[in-house]
Image (cartoon, rainbow, N blue to C red):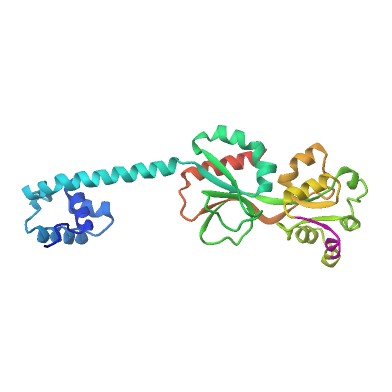
Amino acid sequence: MQNSMPPLSALRAFEATARLGSVTAAADELNVTHGAVSRQLKSLDEHFGVALFAKAGRGLVLTHHGEQLQSGVGEAFSRLRDSCAALKHEVEEASFTMACPGSLLARWLIPRLDRLHRDLPELKLQVVVSDTEQPGKPTDASATLAFTEPPWPADIEVISLMSEQICAVASPALAAHIDPTKPESLFANTLLVTASRPQAWPQWASAKGLEQGALKDALQQGQSFAHLYYLIEAAVAGLGIAIAPTLLVEGELSSGRLIAPWGSIETSAQLCLLLPKHANLRRSEPLAEWFKQALKG
């Protein structure tokens, strides 16, 4: 027996033409050519062996057989549209998941998280910890907040929030024995390093005009920590001198728990909101704007 069900694409062209009363309007809605819609309608006439449309002036009207088909096809496509719209709305209104490195989360975001929830309640933000301090691309989360630097992968959208600044910090007791006019004087102290940011010390030393060989020797005698959070806590405890993003030690610098004898330098990295390519910006743009305002203090 011949299949009584014609191609879905042909039925879609028929439904749009019947609803809009014009092949041209149907073609515009379906984003295809006028000829493509006409061919689909002709294939339906041939499939059923009857004419489904008749000309009426510049437009088309349904024949008796066309009205019979439209009664079922129109309802079916209407239900499809409603189902798709409901699903899209549900997905868009679901919680927005943002990944964030642990140190940035603990030291900067968490103290501001309650205000963020109050200011953007419709976002339903959920925060998860990302695997690395400087991810190169988003995880399965809706977005990632992180310090990262170009070039960025082609499959992500990047919203830059601020340029990164870093500084060498020490406890007040340790800083009292450091000559701020001589950056090389830090080599007499224990240097604290973290595997998550191996470029931090070389960047800072280069900006201060220090000899990289001397830095390498000092780092070999230094103490290493797996995470930036522990590195900063070690500096507060007076275990040595650390390089940290200025943003993450603002509280300690303000309270005097840490001293930055040589000030801050700007790096090539930026604090960014990383998004999947072609992401819907309706929800991420307000979040990015909120971060920009929060970063102003």
Query: Is 29 left, or right, of 105 in this rendering?
Result: left
- Reply above or below: 181 against 219: above
Closer to the camera in the image, 225 or 22:
225
Name the residue: 73% across, 58% down.
195
Name the residue: 66% across, 51% down.
163
User: Hey, which quadrant is residue 13 in on the image?
Assistant: bottom left
Q: Which quarter of the rendering shows the C terminus?
A: top right
Q: Which quarter of the rendering shows the N terminus?
A: bottom left
Is residue 42 something one can see in this rendering? yes
Where is residue 67 drawn, in percent x and y? 10, 46
Query: Is 107 left, or right, of 143 in this rendering?
Result: right
Magenta segment range? Answer: 217-225
Where is residue 252 drawn, in percent x and y? 78, 40
The residue lying furthest to the right in this view is 177
In reply to whether residue 219 is colored magenta, the answer given is: yes
In reply to whether residue 57 is colored magenta, the answer given is: no
The residue lying furthest to the front in this view is 1
Is residue 56 something one can see in this rendering? no
Name the residue: 52% across, 62% down.
154
